[in-house]
Image (tube, grey):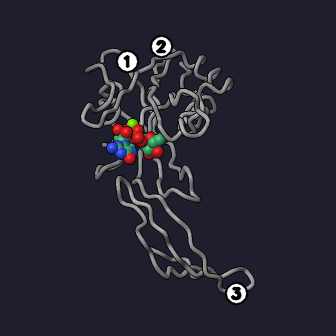
Amino acid sequence: MFTNKNVKIVSEEVLSDNWYTLRKFTFDYQRKDGVWERQSREAYDRGNGATILLYNKIKQSIILTQQFRLPTYTNGNATGMMIESCAGLLDKDNAEACIRRETEEETGYKIGSVKKIFEAYMSPGSVTEILYFFVAEYDEGMKMGAGGGCDAEQENIEVMEIAFEKAVQMLKSGEIRDAKTMMLIQYAQLNNLLAA
Ligand SMILES: Nc1nc2c(ncn2[C@@H]2O[C@H](COP(=O)(O)OP(=O)(O)O[C@H]3O[C@H](CO)[C@@H](O)[C@H](O)[C@@H]3O)[C@@H](O)[C@H]2O)c(=O)[nH]1
Ligand SMILES: [Mg+2]
């Protein structure tokens, strides 16, 4: 799994495994001048995730979600509320199966075909997570329930259907400031995703 000849992992220590896992790695790193240096870095492993932009070309609308995100509340987000694309952790599923399940749980839509557009490390200096990005069309016929998330996980998710142009404005105004959501909206703009 490790193939970088300039890096030798020396040790790995679990600092916390209360919910997800925080590890401290000690490793030797060979600099460009050939000198080996010992370093240590913490890495937070909360698994991998998937996210999706649901869009409707006829209505020129998209589906987003809104929920309370505690970490943002501790860092300058006055209400802690975040407007985000539907997303979830992978569990043991593959990314496509995961995003279908999350979409139904969080938004109530049972979607047809989905398209994977890219994948990204969202915070590579501290979080191990890779996030898989998808887009899919939705319509009212696909609505199976209210969505809202999983009660057992205490998710209180509000489903928002909004005009795509409004979402673009909200990105400009700073009302949307979740990275994955911004990436998806900009992908839709760049690729004329909602063009007839
Ligand atoms: N009890 C407890 N529950 C937790 C904790 N951390 C997370 N959870 C709960 O675990 C559930 C995970 O829900 P998912 O829908 O699977 O994941 P997500 O939090 O929406 O994550 C998605 O968005 C993230 C933020 O953009 C992404 O980083 C992630 O990859 C994924 O796409 C949520 O109900 C969340 O509140 C914790 O420390 N304790
Ligand atoms: Mg989620």
- Describe the element under mark 3 as helix, strand or loop: loop
Q: Which residue is mark 2?
A: 58
Q: Taking 58 as reference, is 7 left or right?
A: right
Contact, mark 1 vs mark 2 (Cβ under 8 Å): yes
Q: Nearer the viewer, residue 49 or 60?
A: 49
**Residue 151 in picture, x, y percent from top left:** 26, 31
Q: Nearer the viewer, mark 3 or mark 1?
A: 3
Say if disc 1 is inside 8 Å of ligand 2: no
What amino acid type is highlighted by mark number 3? Val
Q: Residue at x 36, y 27 (%)?
A: 156
Above or below residue 195? Residue 122 is: below
Q: Which residue is mark 3?
A: 35
- Describe the element under mark 2 as helix, strand or loop: loop
- Describe the element under mark 1 as helix, strand or loop: loop
Which is more N-terminal, label 2 or label 1? 2
Which is more N-terminal, label 1 or label 3? 3
Q: Residue at x 68, y 23 (%)?
A: 173
